[in-house]
Every structure is written in structure tokens, then in C-alpha cells.
Amino acid sequence: MSISTQSPDVIAQLASEKRTWPGWSTIESEPAVFNELLKNIGVRDAQVEEVYSLDEDSLNAIKPVYGLIFLFRWKSEVDPEETEVSCPEGVWFANQVTDNLCASLAMLNIVMNCPDVDVGEHLRSFREFSRDLSPPLRGLALANFEYLRQCHNAFARKAEMMDSDIGLLGASKRRKTTAEEEEEESFHFIAYVPIGNSLWELDGLKRQPVKLGECTSETWLSLATPKIQERILRYEQDEIRFTLLAIVKKPLTILQSQLSTNVKLVGLIERRLDSLDANWKCALSEDSANLGVDIDDTDVDQVMVADIESELDAARLVDRRAKLVQEHDTLRFKIREEQEKLETYTTYATRKQHDYSPFIRKMLGFLADNQSLQQYLE
């Protein structure tokens, strides 16, 4: 007797049920999952990374940062921060009006307020449609945004969908024996994002945004850091778990741009050296072959270009070229590392979108039919 894996028909049926299911699933709080979600909803060149330290060096290493997301086990409390009377013009903010939307909402509350982020056709249209809505109505519109729901629910599980539909998910939580156990399952996301000349806290459970102070694009992280540290200290005392995530410019895009600039500068230096000394390559110890990067559309600082083209000392140009070639090798290494990390993210997210429960049930049934299940339970 043999056991078959899920048939294409079963997989197609599950995918169809996810697309048409009207609810919102819980999703795992992992950068790999959030990155796949951002990609699927059309956001380009933005990436979610976990932040392990709030020290200056750690934050500088991931710049530019579009916004921070503080994830914590929710606990009912009175927050001393004052919200605005109404949502200020120029701030896109939506309330959370449905369960399990908080992760997607926190990311949208950041990227929808970042002019440097290409949010894609679907989110651009939704941002324009919801521009004049109040936060509650904007949240309601978001809860009924079918395209976003389909992308979000790509990570749904059949069992969770069924539990939600028949009301068992809520009943299960109510069977918890203590309030602490109940709260343990409730996680919440708060976004911190610079908009204009101010830093804002965007919490979907609050009626309006909270203005935390004046800042610039260069100083907002130093303003946000103590606010987040206050929360961390407050929650550490109650042993509340938390995670800090950052939405940043995609590191691979930055590295590839730096590599293209590097190659173009090497080319400029080599052409300048050719005009000064036709035999300059004879003294080189390393391979001077083409560095192999398409640089046609690469912009280079014109001050640097003018500096190279006016340089008369061939030896200085050779030294400068050597440093750039060394930097080139470092950039290549970092790009390979980043590509491998993204491949790992994609693999993880792809597996999380696959529902293994039908296969597991089939396998357990097979073991039971063959009277082999008991030995694995003992």
C-alpha cells in the first residue's frame, strides 16, 4: 500500500478557498513572511528587517529606514501620549476595524506615508480612493480591500479558516483559564514613521495618530529610539515579549547601485590614465579585465567626475583605482550574501503559504489503517 501526496486538484481547491475567503488570517511575525507580503501587494525596493539593537551603529547599518514597527504582546493600559483631535492632512492613517489585520495595517501605515517608496498600482489607487476618508472609514475600506486580503490570506491555514467561520477560534480563546493566558495570544503592532517634519506613532487601535515631536529625515531615528526604549523597559518588567522591525530600502538595490557606480568610476579612471600614460597597466599586479556590470544608466557625482578628469598625477589615479577594485570585491561579496538571504526568505515564505494539514491528516490516517500510529504515540 502506498500513500499519495496532495493532488493538484486539492492544492488548486485550497488556493481558491483562500482567494475567496472573506476573513483575515493570522500571519507569522517573520521578516521573510512580511517581505513576501510586501512584494505580493506590489511594494517595490522596500524590505522588512528585524532590529536587534537600538544603538546608533546598528541603526546606521540599515539606513535608509522608512519606518519602525514595534510588535508586542498586547496588554490593556492607559497610554499617556495624546492623540490628535483629527487626522492631520498629509498623514495616511487607518484604524484597525477587523481582527488579524494589524501586521498588514502597520506596514501600510508606513509605506503609504513614504514618498520614496513605490507602493505599486493597487496601493496607489487605494491611497487616492481613501485620501479624504476618516481613519475609521479608511480602516473599514481596508478591511474590504479584496486584493490586499487575498495577498494577506496566502498564508492562511484551512483549519484556521474553518474555525473562524464557525466561531470556534473565539470560543477556544475564551476557554483559557486565566487572563494572562488569553493575553499571551494577542499581539499588536505599532508603527513609527517620519512624515513631513514630524515623527508620528501610528497605532491602529487609537482613534488618531500621535505626534511625537519635530524631526528631519536624518534625526527621526534618534527621536524614536527613546520612545521605543521606554516601551521596552515598561514591558520587560511584565515579562512581555516584543520584537522590533524596520522597513528599509532594499539592501540589494543599494548594493547594486554602489557596484555600478564603482565600476563606472574605475572606467573613468582607466580612460584618464590612458590619456596620461599608455603603459600604466604594465605596473598592475591584479587582473584588469572588465568588471562585468552594466553601467549605462548609472549616475555618478559630477564633482567626482571632474576631479578624475582633471587629475594629472598618474600614480595617484592608480592608487585610487586599486582602492575601488578592492571595494568592488567587497561589494560583490555583500551582494552574494544578500541574494542568498533573499533566497532563504523566499523559500521560507513559500513553505509558509503551503497548507500541509491535508497531507498530515492523510499520513495519520494511513498510519492508523496500518496499525502503525500507536508506536509513534508511545
Image (cartoon, grey):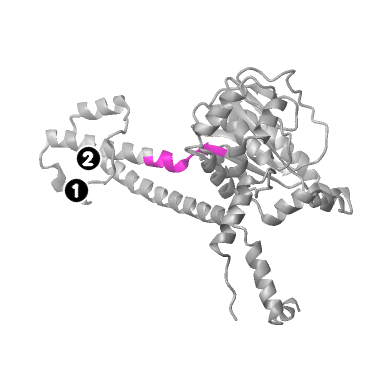
Can you give x and y, in whole percent of width and height, for residue 91 in the image? 62, 22
| Residue at 48% over, 50% down | 342
| Residue at 65% over, 63% down | 358
Asked whether 250 falls inside the magenta stretch, the response is yes
Asked whether 82 falls inside the magenta stretch, the response is no
Q: Is residue 55 visible?
A: no
Numbered badge on residue 318: 2
The span shown in magenta is: 247-256
Name the residue tied to disc 1: 284
To which quarter of the image does residue 147 belong?
top right
To which quarter of the image does residue 125 belong?
top right
Can you give x and y, in whole percent of width and height, for residue 138 in the image? 67, 27
* Residue 371 sits above or below residue 226 on the image: below
Query: Is the residue under label 2 in contact with that under label 1 (CB below 8 Å)?
Result: yes
Report the side of 23 relative to 178 (left or right). Answer: left
* Residue 163 sits above or below residue 68 on the image: below
| Residue at 68% over, 44% down | 24
Nearer-the-camera pick, 52 or 69: 69
Can you give x and y, in whole percent of width and height, for residue 85 in the image? 75, 18
Amino acid of disc 1: Leu
